[in-house]
Amino acid sequence: MSLELKLKDLPTNSGIYQYFDKDGKLLYVGKAKNLKNRVKSYFSFTPSLSPASKLSPRIHSMITQTCDINYIITPSENDALILENSLIKQLKPKYNILLRDDKTYPYIYIDTSEDFPRIDITRKILKSKHIKYFGPYSVGAKDMLDSIYEIIPLVQKKSCISGGKACLFYQIKKCLAPCEGKIDKKDYKVLVDQALELINNKNKLITLLTNKMQEYSDQFRFEEALEIRNRIKSIKKSQIKSSFDFANKENLDLFAIQTTKEMTDAVIVRMFIREGKLVSSTHNYIKQTQTIDMDEAYKTALINYYSKDLPIIPNEILLAHNIEEQESIQNFIQEKLNKKIYITNPKISKKKQLIEVAIKNAKELLKIDTKQQQQTLLQDIKELFNLQNLPLRCEAFDNSHMMGQACVGAMVVFEQNFIRSDFRHYNLDSKDEYSQMNEMLQRRVQSFEKNSPPDLWVIDGGKALLDLAIDIVSSYGANIDIIAISKQKIDAKAYRAKGAAKDIIYTKDNIFKLEPSDKRLQFIQRLRDESHRFAIEFHKKQKRVQDKQISLLNIHGIGQAKVAKLLQYFGDFDSIKKASLKNLKEIMNEKDSTTIYKYFQKNQ
């Protein structure tokens, strides 16, 4: 069916729609209350099918490339909104905005039901009416906590009270030993109130830390002074300077987005007002190869943040700009959080002034965006390898094994720097490199809903593994560029002379043999080398575990050659342990089979 006939045959139900180009690549995912009305608004049907007039340059470009459309009907507009957000995360369409900063932020909390409560950090909602939360914080939460325990002698560890005896913390004057009754609940509450005041008043906390830093410096305790200085820097990063104090103790969330003139870069600032005071702020940058749509950026930011359960629910959400789908997003948030929350764009009063503070800070953050040099390198990489995306976030893959044993894979993630918290190890069942890479990449695409796809995959391997990766991504439909890098071989041996590694880079259409001094090659090598290091590190760990298991069998007269035979047949030690005597006899003689079977039966 032609595109024009599909457009005319659209239903009037709510749902999501997907635009595809001539190669079947996904361009865009959108949601609609009425699919027919929404989708047809992008097109003009006379004298022939073409993009509608008055479209933005970004949308006009998208519709010009659109050759096919699919849609999914949903029970309601809210369901469409959820499905749209999920598909954008999983597939990363070319013209949608993907905000990766949708993690759960940490909160500082205290359980007031305890006799001698401690202040701690959580990313989960703790179900108790006695829990009081502060935050959320993008940075600085742990530094604030450590600093408070440095200054105020609260109970330092969870185990202290149950110990029943004063410990080292009492001796160094960092705890007043409530475990031995040396301070009562009333006096301890005074300390708790002081600690909570420092959470709400970061300037006072920074002043006390500065005094402590000077004290350590005067005592020639320079390492401790340096640690305090680093904490101060971290705490300062988490705050936006503002003297606003709302008399009615409101809880407000604020979102402000500011773009560059070219509309390809932006920063989103979130500010959190708790009980009338600005307690924390977060920000992250948005980088696009297409111009940024403000409506879509706000929608994505709001859906991402409010799709999760929150310890503190605001009374109102302030936006720095009006957006088209404000009402539908408001309905979604109210249904999700089970609370009537209004989304507003204030024009007067302190709320308007607070918006202006957020926009001013967003502009400053765009000015001091220090990634310009790296951006130039990434742009060069994009142009050289003819990538669709600017490779802001890259994932590199490698696998490792030894004669089919301890088969593992590794994924490393780079976004400005290596993000070690996003690194992943894989225990693999496959025995050859091709099958191992297939298994690892299949598992990665299955996790796209939880962890969105990157801009670029770097595969350690040659053309065969590149084609494999392309097939996997194509079958899934995600928008990812893929390149492979393999070692140059001389006389069938990999050439890895230090400082002169002549690696070969494969893309879908070309092969590149760059000079070792080429910065673009060095960048890809850096990703490959880190994935290799991470895979080898895990392989060694897993091999030690297997060697330990092998040594257990050796004690009972089963040599390494027989163990290798068992592993080749059963795949892993767990399968050997669970094998029946009959199964063991299929590959071993009766004596060895009986020895192995009895050994594992005895030790189960």
Image (cartoon, grey):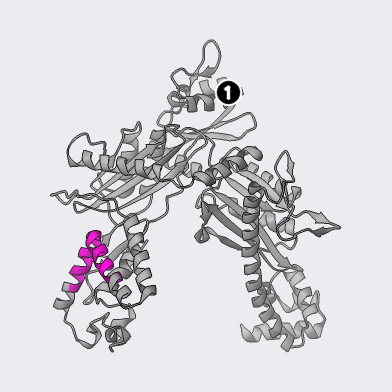
Residue numbers of the magenta segment: 191-213
Task: Tell whether position 4 is magenta.
Answer: no
Circle 1 — which element? helix
Using residue 155 as the reference point, say whether residue 445 is left or right of it: right
Residue carrying label 1: 3
Callout 1 amino acid: Leu
Q: Callout 1: 10 Å neighbours few (<14), some, many (20+)?
A: some
Q: Which residue is at the far right?
A: 491
Q: Nearer the viewer, residue 191 or 576?
A: 191
Using residue 213 as the reference point, say whether residue 191 is left or right of it: left
Is 243 placed above or below 187 here? above
Using residue 154 as the reference point, say whether residue 289 is left or right of it: right
Is 318 placed above or below 170 here? above
Q: Which residue is at the far top?
A: 47
Q: Nearer the viewer, residue 594 or 148?
A: 148
Q: Residue at x 37, y 61 (%)?
A: 123
**Of helix, strand and loop, which mostly describes the magenta segment?**
helix
Expressed as whole percent of the image width and height from the top left, the position of residue 12 reads: 44, 26
Please say whether residue 248 is visible from this viewpoint. Answer: yes
Q: Nearer the viewer, residue 531 or 378?
A: 378
Task: Tell whether position 196 is magenta.
Answer: yes
Identify the image quadrant of residue 167. Answer: bottom left
Please say whether residue 132 is visible from this viewpoint. Answer: no
Expressed as whole percent of the image width and height from the top left, the position of residue 385 reads: 66, 40
Q: Residue at x 49, y 20 (%)?
A: 43
Q: Nearer the viewer, residue 593 or 493?
A: 493
